[in-house]
Amino acid sequence: MYYELYELNHAALSPWRAAADATRLYFRNPLNPLAHTVFGKSVAAAGELFERVTRRYGKPAFGLEETTVSGVKVPVHEEIVWERPFCRLLHFVRDVPKGRPADPKVLVVAPMSGHYATLLRGTVEALLPGHDVYITDWVDARMVPLTDGQFDLDDYIDYVISILHVLGGDTHVIAVCQPAVPVFAAVALMEEDKDAFVPSSMTLMGGPIDTQVNPTAVNDLAKQHDLGWFRRNVIMRVPFPHPGFMREVYPGFLQLTGFMSMNLDRHMTAHHDYFHHLVQGDGDSAEKHRDFYDEYLAVMDLTAEFYLQTLERVFVGHDLPNGTFTHRGRPVRPEAIQSTALFTVEGEKDDISGVGQTEAAHRLAVNLPEDRRAHYVQPNVGHYGVFNGSRFRSEICPRIADFILSHDGSRRRNESAYWSKMVGQGGGATPAVTPEAAVSAEVAAPVQAVEPAEAVSAPAPEPRVKAEAKPEKAAKPEKKKRKKASEPAPRTGLAAVRLDAPRGTADDLTRIQGIGPRIAERLNGLGIYHFDQLAALDAEAIEEIHREIGFPGRILRDNWIGQAKDLS
């Protein structure tokens, strides 16, 4: 009945919404003298505010039409590569140059918790420059006919496994918030089955793996009532004429009410400020408000069975940390996870998934080697800051990218090509490292900067042996050695490029993709201030820098040397 009343209220307000919009246009018409007065601007602002507050927001578009790859802008378009009644898999196809080494394949599993997948627009945008990105685009349950069947937590896990099979091997999965539990369960099942398409790495961000740790207001609400109370009070049937007519759902408008009530004063203040921005003509601030609330107020219905099952098994029963989680009656065994690298990310001020709830995944994956796991807590961010915003772009995303590249099998197999292109010395090409050697490299340092250097020096004894067969020619190198014996040995490694101070003004090293403000500071501390210094790095210097900045392989993966040569 509540759903029908909501629809009736929305329909009843339609004429008033149209009138408010017409009023806004009238008082903003430059030919209207009142449009230039405070009164006219106030009336127009009030009309716009009323229209936006009473509007039903549809699904936004991702709108990602281009990205920057290796310093070059390239177009991006979306393709649907897999589809089921409740989900579509979108691929953000980048028009990159042919022959360019393939970037890591990343599957972003968006939360099915009320908002559309476009809530992760910023996440996708930050990943696109260095990754081949796919995302789960969940479908509004009210738009799925009842004849297409149900969708519960078990189906969610099946969808994840099916998508990983479609994408094939060497896939990296990122689960944002709610999907942390089903993704973790899917990986555990695939590991136990020795599935060939188990992901290379899994990144869990702000997810409720164990809500017994630092419970938040959301967790407490789930415990205040039994499952019957939620079924009676929040589960409703989709009204006519929606395609999902008669399907039992947890309506999006109820979810939105819950979201906003948690920070009602903040939302009231935001709309109050928006009104004044419109009156004052502050277009930039007003546009930021529109962009945020166009996304935030766009919500979707969830199937009743998925919502209630998630509530019961994740937030009330704590099945995963208690060892009782099952998938279609089959026990899920986190201890089976042994090969998929695990990275967990949390926000210090997260008021939805408390600090420690996501990190609990490490406690469950007891058989995962230490060199295949990492955890990071981002200071001064809340829940949404974990996957969006400036700190995500500058602090969190680079760490995710490094973790993915450190555990990317396909990229390690192409490592020899990178060495040959970037670190070849003396005019000769660097001998290739075999794919077998690259794959077998230690995960703790997947890009072994020493090995290519050793490969260069390994053939050296052979020419000397041949030179000994001809005494008259062997004497010349010997004479050259005696001549240089008193000269100091040439410097190698960082010592060859290090400066005590910059030559005049230091270059802005952050212009190189992959170098942020903090890494630039570390490089300055190592005596590197200019692009030409980076362009002149040899294998030994690269290894030293890797040890200092703590990101093995980053210089080669992001092509610092090539970028530095272009900039210098």
Image (cartoon, rainbow, N blue to C red):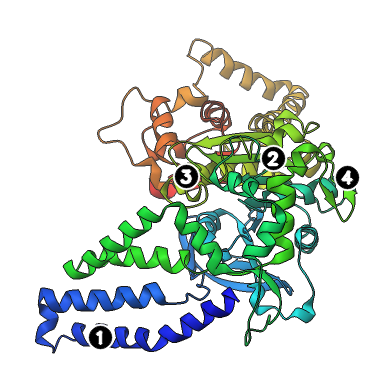
Residue type indicated by callout 1 = Thr
Query: What residue would you read off at disc 2?
Result: 342
In what quadrant of the picture does the N terminus appear?
bottom right
Please tell me how crowded label 2 is: few (under 14), some (14-19), or many (20+) other residues with Cα within 10 Å.
many
- Tag 2, which secondary structure? strand
Which image quadrant for residue 219?
A: top right
**Are there few (<14), some (14-19), or many (20+) residues within 10 Å of tag 3?**
some
Q: Which amino acid does label 4 sit on?
A: Glu
First in sequence, mark 2 or 4: give its number. Answer: 4
Q: Name the residue under label 1.
A: 23
Badge 4 element:
helix
* Nearer mark to the viewer, of 1 and 2: 1
Label 1 to label 2: alpha-carbon separation:
55 Å
Q: Looking at the image, is mark 2 or mark 3 earlier in the sequence? A: 2
User: Which residue is under mark 3?
Assistant: 382
The amino acid type of the residue labelled 2 equals: Leu
Real-space CA distance between mark 1 and mark 3, rounded to the nearest whole angstrom: 39 Å
Q: Is residue 454 left or right of residue 36?
A: right
x, y percent for residue 342? 69, 40
Indicate the quadrant where residue 308 lies: bottom right
Q: How far apart are labels 2 and 3 at the CA level? A: 22 Å
Q: Where is residue 397 in the image (x, y as percent from the top left)?
A: 52, 46
Where does label 4 land, which residue? 192
